[in-house]
Amino acid sequence: MFHHTGIGLRQPHYAALLAAPPPLAFVEVHSENFFAEGGAALQVLDAARRHWPVSLHGVGLSLGSAAGLDEWHLERLAALVQRIDPVRVSDHASFARAPRRQGGPVVHGNDLLPVAFTAAALDLMVANVQRVQERLRRPLLVENLSAYLHWADDCIAEPEFFNELVRRSGCGLLLDVNNLVVNALNEGGGEAAAVQAACRWVDAIAPASVGEIHLAGYNDTGSLVIDDHGSRVHAPVWQVFRHAVQRLGARPTLIEWDTDLPALEVLLDEAALAEAVLLR
C-alpha cells in the first residue's frame, strides 16, 4: 500500500494500470493533455479517478509572463478541475508567453523558460498566481524550475523568492528535488557539493509551504546535466530527498518519468523506494 507516493499516468501504461490498479496514493497527469471536451483520453482519466486521487500538473500557464495569462488556457483548466476534482493542481515558476517583438502579438514559446529573481518578477508572478487561484477557487502549487541560464539582474535568492510568493499569494510549493540537484550539478563542484547546495535550498524554504515533492532521473552529458525525466532517480537526488523528508515530514511524492518510459514494474519499484523513505 502506497500512503504517500504516486506515479505519472502515461498512455503506454493505461491498460495495465486500469486492468489491475495498484494501491497508489495518487496518479498525476499533465493538465493540457486533457483539455479537449471529450475523447478517449478524458474517458481514461475519468476511469483513473475512480481508482485513485488525481493530481493535475500543468506546463502551460506561464505564471511568470509579463504578458499575463492566456484566458482560454485558464478556462480549459478550470473546466478540467471542475470535472476531475483533483487532489492538487500545480504548474511551474516559469514563463512562455511573450511578444516576438515590442508591440507585437503574444505567442507561446512552448517551453519552461526561467524567470528573473527580482522584485518586479515576483510582483508579476504573485498577480498571476492569485488570478489562477481566484478562477479555480483553490490554492495552486508552484514548482521550482531546472534552469540552464540566469538573468543578469537576479537579486533575490531562489528560496526566498518562493517564500515571498507563498506568503503574498497564498499558494504552495511543489518541491522538485531533481531540479535542485540538476541546477547544483550544473554550477560545478561535483556530486557532494551539489547535494550540500540542494539541502541548503531545502533548509531555506518555509516547511509548511510544501504540498508535493517530485523525484525524477536526469541525464549527465558530461558538459551539461539535463532534466530529462528518462531514467531511475539518481543517488544524489535520493540523498536530498531523505534530507527533505527529515526536515519537512512526509509529503505526497511523485515518481516523474516522461521519456524512455520503462515497464510499469520499474515505475512501481521506484515508487516503493520513495515510500520506504517517507515511512521512515
Image (cartoon, rainbow, N blue to C red):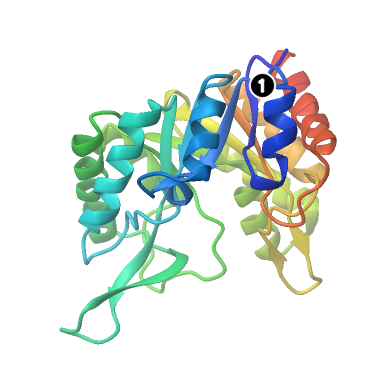
Q: Is residue 187 left or right of residue 122?
A: right
The image quarter containing residue 269 is: top right
Point out the image quarter for the C terminus: top right
* Residue located farthest toward the front when viewing the structure as drawn: 39
The residue that label 1 is drawn on is: 24
Image coordinates for residue 221, horizontal then vertical, percent: 79, 70
Image coordinates for residue 95, horizontal then vertical, percent: 37, 62
Point out the image quarter for the N terminus: top right
Q: Is residue 168 left or right of residue 62?
A: left
Q: 56 and 218: which one is in front?
A: 56
Q: 142 and 151: which one is in front?
A: 142
SS at mark 1 in the image: loop
Q: 246 and 65: which one is in front?
A: 65
Work out whether residue 203 can be spotted. Answer: no
64 to 136, vertically: above or below: below
Image coordinates for residue 111, horizontal then vertical, percent: 47, 67
Residue type, numbered disc 1: Leu
Image coordinates for residue 248, horizontal then vertical, percent: 56, 23
Residue at x-position 67% and y-position 28%: 18
What crowding class fits label 1: few (fewer than 14 Cα within 10 Å), some (14-19), or many (20 or more)?
A: some
The image quarter containing residue 90 is: top left
Work out whether residue 67 can be spotted. Answer: yes
Residue at x-position 40% and y-position 29%: 84
Residue at x-position 30% and y-position 30%: 82
Q: Is residue 214 left or right of residue 103?
A: right
* Residue located farthest toward the left when viewing the structure as drawn: 103
The image quarter containing residue 110 is: bottom left
